[in-house]
Amino acid sequence: METKQVRFETWAVVELFGHNQLAGKITEQVIAGQSFVRIDVPKTSKCPAFTKYHLPTAVYGITPVDEDYATRMADRIQAQPINDYKHNEVINEIIKERLTELTTKQLNY
């Protein structure tokens, strides 16, 4: 008897260790032979859409909800794709370089 593998996919609010929450579309993804929980957080009023991967051991709760509820929760949670000080330094450096490039192009016209 052959067993059909069902793809896990749902909109949900995910509770993570460290009292963190994310809301979005949840799937399972294997990376380098290891299974991860993939959370595709939708665009909110203050943040672009982004994807986070967590090991299942970092998750202590998944509450399935519909897409509308997950999107509204994502807007209230206001999670950021990258929120570490060192990442902010790199992002600021990239922004400065892009602004310099744009300014240079405008001056050359």
Image (tube, rainbow, N blue to C red):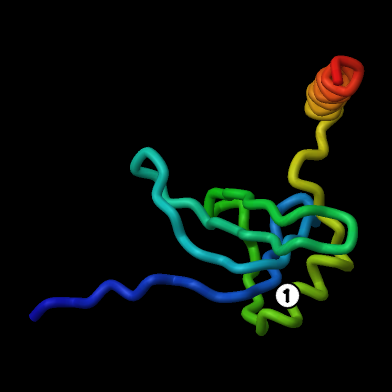
In the figure, is residue 8 to the left or right of 69?
Answer: left
Q: Nearer the viewer, residue 5 or 49?
A: 49
**What is the x, y in percent for residue 67?**
67, 79
The quadrant in which residue 75 appears is: bottom right
Query: Where is residue 31 drawn, in percent x and y?
Result: 41, 43
Residue drawn at (67%, 67%), measured in percent from left and top? 24
From this viewpoint, is residue 86 visible? Answer: no
Could you tell me which residue is drawn at 64 percent across and 62 percent down? 60
In-front residue for pair 33/67: 67
Across the whole image, how many numbered discs are drawn on residues? 1
* Residue type, mark 1 in image: Ala
Q: Quadrant of residue 7?
A: bottom left
User: How far across and down, in percent of the image, does residue 90 sit?
Assistant: 79, 22
Q: Is residue 64 above or below residue 87?
A: below
Compared with 54, 109 (above or below) is above
> Residue 4, percent across and down?
23, 77
Q: Which residue of the protein is positioned furthest toward the front in this rendering?
A: 109
Q: Is residue 82 visible?
A: yes
Give the farthest residue toward the left: 1
Between residues 58 and 7, which one lies in front from this camera angle?
A: 7
- Residue at horizontal 63%, vertical 50%? 52
Numbered disc 1: secondary structure:
helix
Q: Is residue 56 left or right of residue 13?
A: left
Q: Quadrant of the N terminus?
A: bottom left
Label 1 belongs to which residue? 70
Residue name at image x 88 percent, y 23 percent: 106
Which image quadrant: the C terminus? top right
Task: Using a 10 Å C-alpha cutoff, classify the residue at mark 1 as few (fewer than 14 neighbours), some (14 to 19) or many (20 or more).
Answer: many
